[in-house]
Image (cartoon, rainbow, N blue to C red):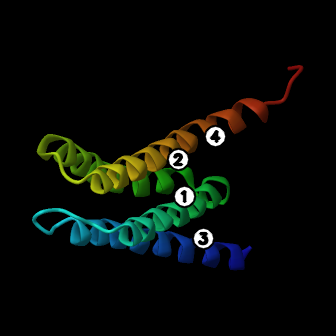
Amino acid sequence: MKKQRILIFILYTTLFILSCWNWIYTMAICSDIPVNPSKSEFFIAESNIVIILIIFIYLTFKGHPPLNILFLFIPNSIWIMNFIQDISIHYHKYSTILSLSMMVVLFIILLGNIFLPIYRLNHTKPHGL
């Protein structure tokens, strides 16, 4: 049990670092004027989003839902602001796709972290009382 807590702590730390790195990396590749990120830079950022998704799925089932929601709320608010900026300023399509995909992934996992504990609670109640 102690090894699982250490693993979960390491995953939360890794998740925070990856989320920050992905945002910083996206800002770096999309900060040139004119904005013109390459396909390889785009795929690196998208693969990082897939890794974040896999870690979040694991932590949804093994982690702590309130902590997951906190970790999801902060990056999702940053990505929402970034997406609004991409849409209003008409940034490059890769920047808009990165913002949208990260925002969608974080929102879906946020809903999973809200509704999975409710589902578990409803299905663990003893029947026949």
Pointer 2 residue: 109
Residue type, label 2: Ile
Q: Quadrant of residue 51?
A: bottom right
Q: CA distance from mark 2 to mark 3?
A: 17 Å
Of callouts 2 and 3, which one flags the residue occurring earlier in the amino acid sequence?
3
Q: Can you give x and y, in whole percent of width and height, for residue 62 in the image?
A: 67, 59
Callout 3: few (<14), some (14-19), or many (20+) C-alpha neighbours within 10 Å? Answer: some
User: In the image, which is nearer the foreground, mark 4 or mark 2?
Assistant: 2
Does 7 sit above or below residue 82?
Answer: below
Disc 3 secondary structure class: helix
Residue drawn at x 36%, y 55% as measured from the top left: 98
Pointer 3 residue: 8
Between 52 and 113, the residue placed more toward the observer is 52
Say whether residue 74 is visible: no
Q: Are marks 4 and 2 in contact (CB under 8 Å)?
A: no
Of callouts 4 and 1, which one flags the residue occurring earlier in the amino acid sequence?
1
Q: Quadrant of residue 63?
A: bottom right
Disc 4 secondary structure class: helix
Residue type, label 3: Ile
Pointer 1 residue: 53
Does 114 sit above or below residue 59?
Answer: above
Disc 2 secondary structure class: helix
Pointer 4 residue: 116
